[in-house]
Amino acid sequence: MVGSAVQRDAVAHLQAVMGLSERRACSIVGADRKMIRYRSRRPPDTELRARLRDLANERRRFGYRRLFILLRREGEPSGVNRIHREEGLSVRKRRARRKAVGARAPILVEAKPNARWSTDFVHDQFANGRHFRILNIVDDVTKQCLGAIPDTSISGRRVARELTALIERHGKPGMIVSDHCTEYTCNAMLAWCRDNDVDWHFIAPGKPMQNGFVESFNGRMRDELLNETLFFDLDDTRTKIAAWIADFNTARPHSALGYLTPAAYAANFTATDDRLRNPDQLRRSHVAPAAPQGVKPADALIAAG
């Protein structure tokens, strides 16, 4: 089964090369003559196509949904799925990792900013081959990236200093979630948790899906920034990461937030004191142990999936 465009090309070929009539060529191809004669009256959408190509070149890992959100902000009401496909802008999917198998339980988080933060490290390298690390801290409810600190070496004491600075700017979190990395389990961090009265939760060994919020953020950073950018030195890295984080928080549509930006969702959340999120996301939550002690009853909880 072939499309109408292919059938038109086949009929035109038979007419030009073999000298057949339109009726005979359509009979051989099995095409309707009305379809062969049809000419689309759809407008060319030249400006929309040009703008879509510009956005796709600027954000090469964005699919048509996020590109449509950006165009809609500019006042474009029509969809772009067809044009996106015709322009050949489809994003090639990277090979997916193996997914967890088994029962999944929702992670219950109090519906407010700073209810829980997640933190993890991401590794990459400069153009000269030297490696560096990025300390990422994410708010699990608003999805905002609170900090992305790149350096060639980040110790437990450095982590404690960065967290102290974040608390001064954003307030103290109810809980922080991480893996068992030595930077989080060292004496400096244990002392910091005790002195600042912060509840630190370590996920089960070998279960990164229990820290799924920051792992998802790490995947977006890897896909949209690290794999697409060349870093020359530490200053260059800090500048590019800071620019991407600002764009992530204030411009990039987030699918888990109804395609709002994290900053817009946080501002709306703070203004309305809303305590309800999409309950369907309970079925898509990451694997995790039961709700931590001290969490309020279910009517004041959300599944920050």
Image (cartoon, rainbow, N blue to C red):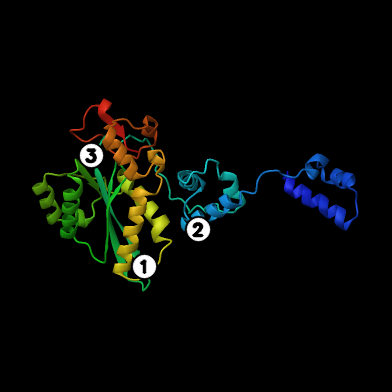
Circle number at residue 57: 2
Towards the viewer: 264 or 134: 264
Q: Amino acid at mark 2?
A: Asn
Q: Is residue 216 above or below residue 131?
A: above
Please determine whether, in this image, residue 175 is positioned above or below residue 277: below
Dot placed on the residue nearer the N-terminal end, 2 or 1: 2
Where the N terminus falls, by quadrant?
top right
Question: As shown in the figure, which amino acid type bears the numbered disc 1?
Answer: Phe
Which of the pair 169/227 is nearer the observer? Answer: 169
Identified at 21% across, 36% down, the residue is: 292
- Distance, label 2 to label 1, CA atoms, is 19 Å
Residue 143, x across and y down, in percent: 32, 44
Q: Are marks 3 and 2 in contact (CB under 8 Å)?
A: no
Quadrant hosting residue 263? top left
x and y percentages locating residue 112 in the rendered image:
25, 36
> Which residue sits at x=23%, y=42%?
114
Q: Give the position of the C terminus as an image quadrant.
A: top left
- From the viewer's perspective, is 169 left or right of 138? left
